[in-house]
Amino acid sequence: MAKDTSPQCKQCRREGVKLFLKGERCLTDKCSVERRSYPPGEHGRGRIKQSEYLLQLREKQKARRYYQVLEKQFHEYYVEATRKSGITGENLLRLLELRLDNVVYRLGFGASRRQARQLVCHAHFRVNGKKVDIPSYQVRPDDVVALKPGSKAAEAVRSSTDLTSSVAPWLLADHDNLTGKILRFPEREEIDAPVQEQLIVELYSK
């Protein structure tokens, strides 16, 4: 299974915002964005001409890295979003939010999306009582996500819930029993992804 193995802190520095790729570390003074707010590389502190194309590209890269999705798969999400009724940009974000690894993270069962992805890949979670080990699995309203009974990851999952201050309003989490339910599809204002999806649509529409 393909995955992005590049340094996570450099990804945040390149986009200039916290993407919360390292869980608890991102909340401390050790966060690289706090310590070095300029982009990585030899010319990171230089002045870069902000063209329209560059702004659109950076927004796409930011969204892709935020959800930990590779380029080909991200483009496939965009194509699927264009086929749905409604606003393409909002459809794109909704598809990304409904990935199982993202839902596990949003429920507070993973300290980061990368950890949530690993937990899903190792089959520590069940969807409606059935084994699902595909991070990109699309959940739907009324689906129930629960930690597998007897899972060796229970302690790590409980530690992650301690870092969770709130859960998205379109989800219902039971941190005592380590279960969660998808109440409905998320609305745009309920998605706190730090991206301007319209710039991504403009980039792919060229």
Image: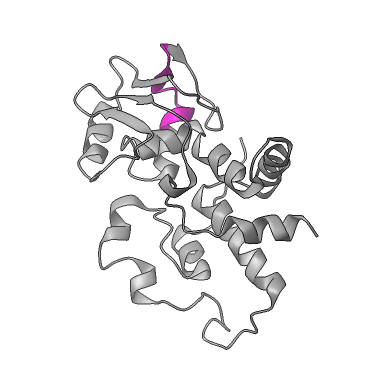
The residue that appears at 32% across and 59% down in the rendered structure is 26
Q: Nearer the viewer, residue 11 or 66?
A: 66
64 vs 166, left or right, is right
Q: Nearer the viewer, residue 24 or 173?
A: 173
Return the x and y of residue 74 as percentages of the image width and height: 65, 46
So how many labels did they put on this image? 0
As drawn, 155 above or below 196: above
Q: Is residue 45 magenta?
A: no
The residue that appears at 26% across and 68% down in the rendered structure is 29
Q: Is residue 120 magenta?
A: yes
Identify the image quadrant of residue 168. top left
The residue that appears at 33% across and 65% down in the rendered structure is 31
Residue stretch in magenta: 119-129
Q: Is residue 117 visible?
A: no
Identify the image quadrant of residue 138. top right
Return the x and y of residue 12 as percentages of the image width and height: 46, 64
Identify the image quadrant of residue 77. top right
Q: Is residue 14 visible?
A: yes
The residue that appears at 47% across and 15% down in the rendered structure is 131
177 vs 12, left or right, is left
As drawn, 133 above or below 55: above
